[in-house]
Image (cartoon, helix red, strand yellow):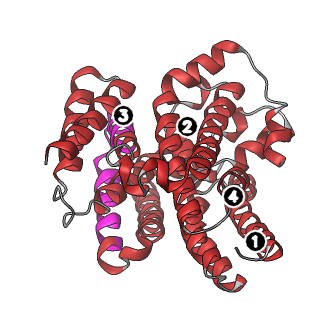
Amino acid sequence: MPEPGYVAIVLGVAIAITVTLRALPFLVKGALAGSPLLDDIGRWMPIGAVAILALYCVSRIDFGAAGHGLPELAGIAVTVGVHAWRRNAVLSILAGTAACVAVTHLV
Amino acid sequence: MTATLLESRLPAPPTDLRDAAREAGVIWAGLFTLGLGFGVLVASDGLPWWLAPVISGSLFAGSVEFLLIGMIAVSAPIAAIAVTTFLVNSRHLFYGLTFPLHRVRGRAQKAYSVFALCDEAYAMLATKDPASLSSSRILWTQAGLHGSWAVGALTGGVLGSTLLGGPGALGGLDFILTALFVVLTMDAYREHKDRVALISAAAAAALAWLVAPGSMLLVAMTAYAVSLAARHRLGRARSLRDA
């Protein structure tokens, strides 16, 4: 068990840095208000950010593990297929996850 | 501590809670599962069980928390912990500019919304039309993510690795977040058929994966932001020329 004082300092430092990083862009936003750059960022950032988060998850698939990445690939295929078909986010996520879990237990 | 203070002030019209739960409930379940894994990790590293909910509730930054546990367990220097936190969480610098904070009413509520601005909150809320989001809908979505993560960590810490059979026992359920980001990308593309954005994002991700797989998210977001600035300048130059 590490010293409680040490844990408190670690946590305080990590919280201060994280909150600062999350708050900083809101301060910049005031200076950019009404600029065409901010309009373009608003149009392009969300789609790029979610695409990068999705690709990041794909990059973390462990192809050396027991299933050789098959559960995740099956999950992604089912998620995309169900979402293209029904356009219901919750249904697509549940179906894809169910497929991933099912294949995990099969292979 | 701050979180409970602010949560007690959350407005609670039941329809907004129900809407948030209908849309984000499955993601809350996903974060609960990840939180369980985090709690189990804390217990199996020989740290006290209460550290899991305390860290998850007060820091609420999943990927950094997993790293911090390992560093706390070996009493790593504070400077190393600060650098790690900074590097892993710098990607949040790209979120605030397009997060619909202007829809959140009240100073304390805005402060909570900024505090709880994790990847999942950004992804789910910034891809929506801001006009369709009410203040309490945003806050419930975030409080749900925050609460499930912390309660998951508490449960995992208390039950420990013996009862859950180790961090690997939940195999497959963390896929919920992968599915979330895939679905949100498809929805965002359906909204604006912006092929340039998708290709730039894919190129940024590929570049980051090749040159810095250890900090892929940060490098990819930075490269994407640079490409976005270049695209903006090109568009301006073109519209000036055509004018």
Which residue position is annotated with label 2?
Answer: B125
Q: Position of residue B84 (x, y in %)?
A: 59, 76
In the picture, the disc for residue B187 is: 3
Q: Amino acid at mark 3?
A: Asp
The answer to whether dots 4 and 2 both sit on one chain is yes
- The residue that label 4 is drawn on is B55
Using the image as rendered, state which of residue B86 and residue A32 is in the foreground.
Answer: B86
Q: Label 2 amino acid?
A: Leu
Q: Quick check: is B101 in the magenta stretch?
A: no
**Residue B228 appears left or right of B3:** left
Tell me: B131 left or right of B189: right
Local secondary structure at mark 4:
helix
What element does badge 3 sit on?
Answer: helix
> Mark 1 vs mark 4: same chain?
no
Q: Chain of mark 4?
A: B
Task: Say yes or no: labels 2 and 3 on the same chain.
Answer: yes
Contact between marks 1 and 4 (CB within 8 A): the answer is no
Disc on the earlier residue, 2 or 3? 2
Q: Residue at x 22, y 46 (%)?
A: A104
Q: What main secondary structure does the magenta stretch of the protein show?
A: helix
B130 vs B202: above or below: above
Q: Is residue B102 left or right of residue B128?
A: right
Magenta region, residue range: B181-208
Vertical position of residue B120 compared to residue A86: above or below: below
Q: Nearer the viewer, residue B231 or A55?
A: A55
What's the CA distance linking mark 4 and mark 2? 24 Å
Q: Which residue is mark 1?
A: A7
